[in-house]
Image: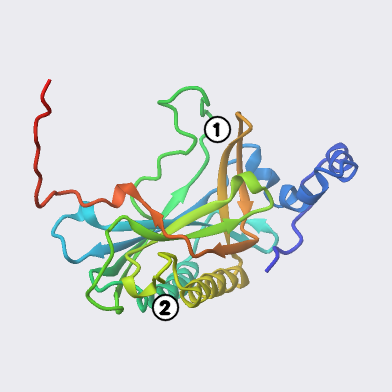
């Protein structure tokens, strides 16, 4: 679903520049929607974080997380405040998606928590300073909820690092977003070591439905951009589509924190 027509944000010379350049013209709509944010205003959005607990481990470090960014766009303008109703809509759609994905997830995984963090670009970000962050610190979540969706695809499971990637398409190919769904059950794999197309179709459809329903409520999925071609460019890019493929991904940070067994042998010098 496309965003409604926003107020006029571009200056006359900027409209002429964009409309007269065939390479920039495809991005005119995107630029209009998020021009205010690209210029470092105080607009804020929300980062939704979902926790999937590894019930086979007592260590929270073994749990898996994924995130998505949402902007509240109300009556043609970006709304930095969120109401309880806004959050209820988010948790309803996210919970429905998690319930759908849990049918394909190993039983060692269980979706247990959702948190919403206030996000804002840091106008004082120094791009070449590794100690400088492009974002203002979020602090504790503004809103949270509990889920209870355990994996329902059997007790057999793949390594914790194996995941299914969901790509968030934007008008700028170099700045697509991505999140990684945890603990896909072995039954989702074909002999080729790729995901079964039916599994891919079901996940893609479920993500698409979640995003469509959120957009209908004027809560739009976006991808953050902090730089473009090496230059600072703090922007929000609207998600225009979702893509899921059959290639499994490996997320190294989801490797088990504790090692059950280890053997070290010296090499003769």
Say whether residue 41 is visible: yes
Q: Is residue 115 left or right of residue 54?
A: right
Q: Quadrant of the N terminus?
A: bottom right
- Residue at 61% x, 66% y is 218
Task: Check disc 1 and report the residue beneath it.
Answer: 123
Q: Nearer the viewer, residue 169 or 234?
A: 169
Q: Nearer the viewer, residue 262 or 120?
A: 262
Q: Is residue 47 left or right of residue 11?
A: left
Q: Quadrant of the C terminus?
A: top left
CB within 8 Å, label 1 to label 2 = no
- Residue at 19% x, 49% y is 257
- Relative image position of residue 136 (x, y in whole percent): 45, 38
- Relative image position of residue 225 (x, y in whole percent): 57, 42
Task: Check disc 2 and report the residue beneath it.
Answer: 100
- Relative image position of residue 191 (x, y in whole percent): 40, 70
Q: Is residue 224 left or right of residue 130?
A: right
């Amino acid at each position: 679903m496309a965003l409604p027509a926003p107020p006029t944000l571009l200056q006359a010379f900027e409209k002429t520049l964009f409309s007269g350049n065939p390479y920039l013209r495809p991005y005119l709509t995107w630029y209009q929607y998020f021009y205010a944010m690209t210029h470092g205003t105080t607009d804020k959005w929300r980062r939704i974080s979902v926790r999937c607990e590894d019930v086979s481990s007592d260590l929270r470090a073994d749990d898996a997380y994924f995130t998505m960014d949402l902007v509240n766009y109300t009556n043609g303008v970006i709304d930095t405040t969120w109401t309880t109703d806004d959050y209820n809509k988010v948790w309803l759609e996210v919970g429905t998606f998690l319930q759908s994905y849990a049918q394909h997830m190993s039983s060692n995984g269980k979706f247990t928590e959702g948190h919403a963090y206030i996000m804002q670009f840091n106008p004082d970000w120094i791009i070449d300073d590794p100690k400088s962050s492009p974002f203002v610190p979020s602090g504790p979540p503004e809103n949270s909820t509990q889920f209870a969706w355990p994996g329902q695809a059997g007790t057999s499971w793949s390594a914790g690092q194996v995941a299914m990637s969901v790509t968030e398409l934007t008008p700028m190919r170099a700045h697509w977003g991505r999140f990684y769904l945890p603990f896909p059950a072995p039954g989702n794999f074909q002999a080729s070591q790729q995901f079964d197309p039916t599994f891919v179709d079901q996940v893609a459809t479920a993500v698409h439905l979640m995003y469509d329903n959120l957009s209908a409520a004027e809560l739009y999925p976006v991808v953050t951009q902090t730089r473009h071609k090496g230059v600072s460019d703090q922007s929000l890019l609207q998600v225009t589509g979702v893509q899921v493929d059959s290639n499994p991904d490996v997320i190294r940070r989801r490797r088990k924190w504790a090692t059950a067994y280890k053997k070290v042998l010296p090499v003769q010098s």
